[in-house]
Amino acid sequence: MGNREYGDEAAIYEMAIMESRRKEAEIPNDIKNGYVIIDDKHIPFSERNIIEGKLYMTIPEGFVLMPLEAAEVKYPNKNRPTIIYTNETGSVTVNFSLTPDELDNEDVEDACEYLQQVITKMHPSSEIISSTVIEGDARIGIFDFVIPALDDEIYNLMFIFPLDGQFILGTFNCSHSEMAGWQDIANQMIQSIRIVQDKRGH
């Protein structure tokens, strides 16, 4: 009798798990819900202050600032990004470069097209997958592409925008094998960007 009761409880528990997964599968993967499911993993999201008092973005809670030693390995060029957030394995990152150049809202589209030309010249085998400009606290130019790497291709989603007149260049990247799970989520992360401009109103 006891074994049968245990078996019934196990079956009920398994059914409850399956029902929970079914309901989660019906919920769109939207970071506004506070979490997403990628490769059967529950990934919580929250807004993070990227640049003190000026730039905010909703990113995975598990992302941390990449230590300098790891950044020097991943980005050996001295012109590495200024701010790099990464998952625990370093396979998925979102970074920001605070460039010395100026950028205004009206120049975002032209700057985006120029960067695409630079990318395709540097990586002739790569093609721009998509390109758009979204309106928000600032105009944000977005485009994505895949480039070859030693052991896997790398998916890149670049985005540019002005912050107090300064040219900010951001990049989300992950391995091509992770692209299917992250591509839409990365776009949502960019759309979550919140900017507090100074009183000059660039």
Image (cartoon, rainbow, N blue to C red):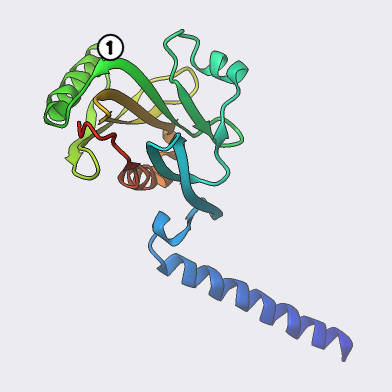
Q: Which sits in the foreground, 74 or 49?
A: 49
Residue type indicated by callout 1: Met
Which part of the image, by quadrant, shows the C terminus? top left
In the image, residue 34 above or below residue 111: below
Q: Secondary structure at mark 1?
A: helix
**Residue beneath the point at 34% across and 43% down:** 193
* Residue positioned most to the bottom: 1
Residue 55: x and y in percent read 38, 37
Above or below residue 74? Residue 135 is below
Q: Quadrant of residue 51?
A: top left
- Whether 192 is drawn above or below 167: the answer is below
- Crowdedness near tag 1: few (<14), some (14–19) or many (≥20) residues, C-alpha within 10 Å: few
Who's the residue at 61% across and 77% down the image? 16
Q: Quadrant of residue 115?
A: top left
- Report the number of discs: 1
Q: Specify the farthest residue to the right.
A: 2
115 displayed left or right of 25: left
Q: Position of residue 76 (x, y in %)?
A: 50, 10
Question: Quick check: 79 left or right of 199?
Answer: right
**From the viewer's perspective, is residue 70 above or below residue 175?**
above
Q: Residue 138, percent across and down?
A: 23, 38
- Residue at x 60%, y 23% (from the top left corner): 67
Could you tell whether 166 is left or right of 56 in the image? left
**Where does residue 194 sit, x and y in percent of width and height?**
33, 44
Residue 56 appears in which quarter of the rendering? top left
Q: Quadrant of the N terminus?
A: bottom right
- The residue beneath circle 1 is 122
Q: In this view, which residue lies farthest toward the top?
A: 78
